[in-house]
Amino acid sequence: MKAKKVVAKKATVKKVTASAKASAVKAKKEPVKKVEKATKPTKEVKTVAINVSDEAVEKQKIIEKFAQKNGDTGSPEVQIALLSYKIGRLSEHLNQNKKDNHSRRGLLKVVAKRRRILNYLQKLSEDRYKVLIGSLNLKK
């Protein structure tokens, strides 16, 4: 692969002539004319109903179910539950699209991430780990 040379362009400087200065001075002395702008017809505003995807609603339910307190999205339980949901969706996709190896690699990365967080939770609190494994029907 060849490296491309980057050449900076030189800035051009325009010289101001005496006639240009004189015309600029004349322009300042002339009275300013007021121009009224014609009003354009206003466009009608269309209201668009925002369709919240089923996936977003499902994720919100998962967060509410596994959150330790209100607004908790970073606890290991919530992260593992969301990753489990994502794994389920990717698995369904791969069952329909067997040759999609890019998504297969993504699935393996998500599974590994969930495994790491599960190991962290197990070291942190064995009780919380067992409750989560039971509620998500995961194997260990």
Image (spheres, rainbow, N blue to C red):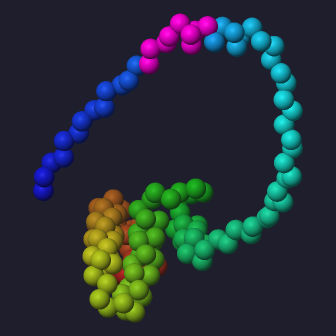
Q: Residue at x 49, y 12 (%)?
A: 16
On the rendered image, what quadrant is the C terminus found in?
Answer: bottom left
Q: Is residue 69 left or right of residue 135?
A: right
Question: Which residue occupies the foreground of this view, 62 or 134?
Answer: 62
The answer to which quarter of the image holds residue 26 is: top right
Question: Which residue occupies the foreground of this view, 34 or 133?
Answer: 34
Q: Residue at x 33, y 64 (%)?
A: 117
Q: Residue furthest front?
A: 19
Report x, y in % for residue 38: 86, 41
Report x, y in % for residue 15: 44, 14
Relative vertical location of residue 123 with respect to residue 41 in this rendering, above or below:
below
Question: Which residue occupies the foreground of this view, 70 or 125?
Answer: 70
Question: Which residue occupies the foreground of this view, 137 or 62?
Answer: 62
Relative vertical location of residue 43 with respect to residue 31 in this rendering, above or below:
below
On the rendered image, what quadrant is the N terminus found in?
Answer: bottom left
Q: Is 94 contained in the magenta span?
A: no
Q: Residue at x 81, y 13 (%)?
A: 31
Q: Residue at x 53, y 57 (%)?
A: 72
Report x, y in % for residue 8: 28, 32
Instruction: Give the residues drawn in magenta, as a range.
Output: 14-22
